Image (cartoon, rainbow, N blue to C red):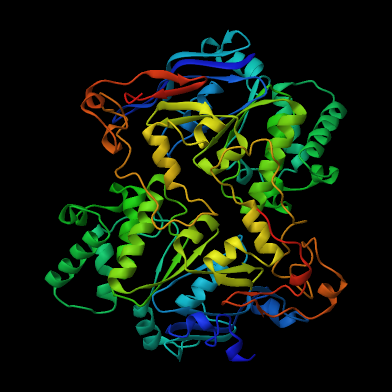
């Protein structure tokens, strides 16, 4: 596949001055369905195509949102970027260096540069570690600063950055003594301990109470400015993605089907699937009790082991024609202004309204 | 309007070794026939506890410590466990439990699961009557007849949630409590389930209580909203009064402005600093005092009372 094709390509007018931090080229992760002996006897090995050829670029200093329903491959994408998984095919370029298949020491060094914030703050911390140790762990693993005093100082500053204060007090506590919001702050602090350049945040606020959710996102924004971070924000929640992300990629069954600025995706979606997602969002506004939501989609999401041929959305699309089934899968089409979509019938679709 | 349910001064306390947790403390509200009442609040505000109390089954070590729950002119708080089982649960009031769709026993088919529920409440019913009733309700929630003989693992999340809703409805209670029925579902499926609940409301004229932490979902479904905080009711108003965003309780106001709107880009969302109070030793005055942005001296020591500030709009705040 042509590399320059990657969505958000360098020829985009609004991105000429932006530095590309991460570039993902034709990335694939196929999980085999037969293992070991079974794979020897199988006529043909079948795969769950969790991520099936995606391209995108993340610019330095931006927040790049990846949204989609469960099973669309957004978390797998995050894990691939983190290199918790090894891709089946494709490239992951961080600062122009391909990290798709690095191992050992190289991989360890790479992870210093890319960190992750997990969804569940209750499960992502060792319950027997004090907060001090939770925050020190990355420093110990990567051998940064060998004195206890240095590490303590760093941990203290981190806690202050993520506003878990008084820091001295919290350092001696165990995770169970903290509220969900405080734990997620600590987990964000742990993410920035090694001053990485990229942070993959996988649903960082979906388990946080509404009243503190906004606070955590605002804090993440401040940290971004303060430490010059770049985020990949993986979520199913469009409302926070619109608020938090600069650009959004929408995934469906392992593919990116639309990508563009957050405003374009929400106000001017092109792909029928993106439109469904946007119309499905509930908004806290009056006068909707007696109105049925207009959800223009049919059926259920197909299994990633049996991806429909042609456009992979055709089984659920209300606008699909014979061509959508018979023609090869559409590639991303440029709609201008850094907005790309994968619907070959876009010009025949009715105007979008919400 | 006829009242389907009246709750007066309900108290539900958890008697733990650390002390008495006043999870639901002196709350009153009512539910009109055919309407949907939304119970919203943060986690730990007592909304699910209230739901369990309405079925007369507080989770141990919880106990109903006072107040009354009136359904059909009878106070069910006084009922014995046996009476509750025979006359109240699923006969008058049923519940879609939070996450119930993930708790369907994997070794039984949908038909067997539903038949079991039916027989528990109405033993000695002929099999074919039960079968007909199950099929009727499966169809009502938009599922085909063949789902009867399917196992839970063969169904998607949305289908399982429909089965759970059918199970809550098929003994034809007049009140249904829905506890976070859309949480954990994908946004598209969520919208479909909300449409289903709206449809059922019109066709079966059931009264329901919709419990959620999400004000946006509540806006879609509830005729009236009851906002809870730290075991107390802070505000009750119609959908228009609450989401019209005029004259709100400071807590509701803050919660609403912390909820992002999809079609309006904002630079900063507001949030509520601090955490809810400890319910073992709740504050003397207003329970929201610590986190309130417009608190006064009076709020610290004197507990506010419910006031009706306009027709059907009740607020528990000294500012009004």
Pick whichever, B87 or B139, lies toward us: B139
Q: Position of residue B101 (x, y in %)?
A: 63, 44
* Residue located 67% across and 23% down the image: B34
**Residue B66 falls in which quadrant of the image?**
top left
Q: Find the residue positioned furthest to the top.
A: B73
**For residue A26, above or below residue A178:** below
* Residue located 60% across and 51% down the image: A281
* Residue located 84% across and 28% down the image: B127
Pick whichever, B18 or A329, lies toward us: A329
**For residue A89, above or below residue B11:** below
Q: Is B45 on the left-hand or right-hand side of B160?
A: left
Number of numbered discs visible in the structure rendering = 0
Q: Position of residue A240 (x, y in %)?
A: 48, 57
* Residue B247 seen anywhere in this rendered image of the structure: yes
* Residue located 36% across and 23% down the image: B320
**Residue A77 falls in which quadrant of the image?**
bottom right
**For residue A88, above or below residue B130:** below
Q: Is B202 on the left-hand or right-hand side of A95?
A: right
Q: Position of residue A194 (x, y in %)?
A: 29, 75
Q: Position of residue B106 (x, y in %)?
A: 67, 47
């Amino acid at each position: 596949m042509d590399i320059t094709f990657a969505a958000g390509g360098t020829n985009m007018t609004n991105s000429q001055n932006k530095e590309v931090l991460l570039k993902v080229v034709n990335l694939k992760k196929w999980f085999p369905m037969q293992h070991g002996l079974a794979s020897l006897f199988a006529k043909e090995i079948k795969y769950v195509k969790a991520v099936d050829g995606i391209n995108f670029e993340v610019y330095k200093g931006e927040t790049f949102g990846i949204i989609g329903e469960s099973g669309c491959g957004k978390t797998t994408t995050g894990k691939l970027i983190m290199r918790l998984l090894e891709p089946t095919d494709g490239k992951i370029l961080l600062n122009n260096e391909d990290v798709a298949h690095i191992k050992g020491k190289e991989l360890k060094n790479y992870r210093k540069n890319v960190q992750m914030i997990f969804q569940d703050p209750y499960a992502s911390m060792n319950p027997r570690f004090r907060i001090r140790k939770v925050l020190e762990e990355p420093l110990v693993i990567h051998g940064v600063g060998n004195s206890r005093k240095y590490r303590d100082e760093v941990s203290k500053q981190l806690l202050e950055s993520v506003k878990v204060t008084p820091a001295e007090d919290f350092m001696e506590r165990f995770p169970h003594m903290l509220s969900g919001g405080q734990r997620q702050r600590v987990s964000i602090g742990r993410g920035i301990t090694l001053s990485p350049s990229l942070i993959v945040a996988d649903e960082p606020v979906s388990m946080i109470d509404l009243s503190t959710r906004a606070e955590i996102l605002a804090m993440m924004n401040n940290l971004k400015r303060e430490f010059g971070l770049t985020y990949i924000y993986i979520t199913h929640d469009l409302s926070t993605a619109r608020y938090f992300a600069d650009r959004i990629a929408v995934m469906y069954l392992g593919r990116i089907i639309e990508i563009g600025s957050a405003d374009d995706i929400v106000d001017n979606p092109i792909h029928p699937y993106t439109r469904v997602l946007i119309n499905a969002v509930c908004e806290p506004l009056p006068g909707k009790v007696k109105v049925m939501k207009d959800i223009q989609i049919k059926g259920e999401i197909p299994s990633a082991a049996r991806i429909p041929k042609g456009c992979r959305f055709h089984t659920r699309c209300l606008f699909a024609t014979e061509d959508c089934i018979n023609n090869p899968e559409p590639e991303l089409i440029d709609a201008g202004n850094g907005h790309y979509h994968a619907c070959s019938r876009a010009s025949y679709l009715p105007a979008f309204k919400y | 309007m006829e009242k389907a349910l009246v709750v007066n001064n309900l108290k539900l306390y958890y008697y733990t070794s650390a002390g008495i947790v006043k999870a639901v403390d002196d709350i009153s509200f009512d539910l009109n026939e055919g309407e949907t009442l939304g119970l919203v609040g943060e986690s730990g505000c007592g909304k699910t506890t209230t739901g369990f109390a309405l079925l007369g089954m507080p989770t141990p070590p919880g106990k109903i410590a006072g107040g009354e729950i009136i359904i059909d002119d009878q106070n069910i708080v006084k009922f014995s466990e046996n009476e509750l089982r025979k006359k109240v649960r699923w006969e008058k009031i049923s519940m879609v439990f939070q996450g119930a769709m993930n708790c369907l026993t994997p070794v039984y088919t949908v038909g067997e699961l539903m038949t079991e529920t039916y027989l528990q409440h109405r033993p000695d019913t002929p099999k074919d009557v039960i079968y007909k009733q199950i099929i009727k309700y499966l169809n009502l929630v938009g599922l085909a007849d063949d789902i009867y003989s399917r196992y839970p693992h063969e169904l998607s999340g949305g289908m399982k949630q429909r089965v759970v809703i059918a199970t809550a409805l098929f003994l034809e209670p007049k009140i249904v409590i829905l506890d976070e029925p859309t949480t954990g579902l994908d946004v598209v499926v969520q919208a479909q389930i909300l449409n289903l609940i709206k449809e059922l409301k019109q066709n079966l004229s059931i009264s329901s209580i919709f419990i959620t932490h999400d004000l946006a979902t509540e806006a879609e479904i509830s005729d009236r909203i009851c906002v809870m905080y730290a075991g107390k009711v802070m505000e009750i108003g119609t959908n228009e009064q609450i989401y019209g965003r005029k004259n709100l309780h400071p807590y509701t106001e803050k919660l609403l402005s912390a909820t992002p709107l999809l079609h309006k880009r904002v630079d900063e969302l507001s949030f509520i600093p601090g955490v809810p109070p400890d319910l073992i030793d709740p504050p003397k005055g207003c329970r929201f005092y610590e986190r309130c942005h417009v608190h006064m001296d009076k709020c610290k020591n004197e507990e506010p009372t419910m006031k009706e500030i306009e027709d059907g709009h009740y607020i528990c705040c000294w500012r009004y």
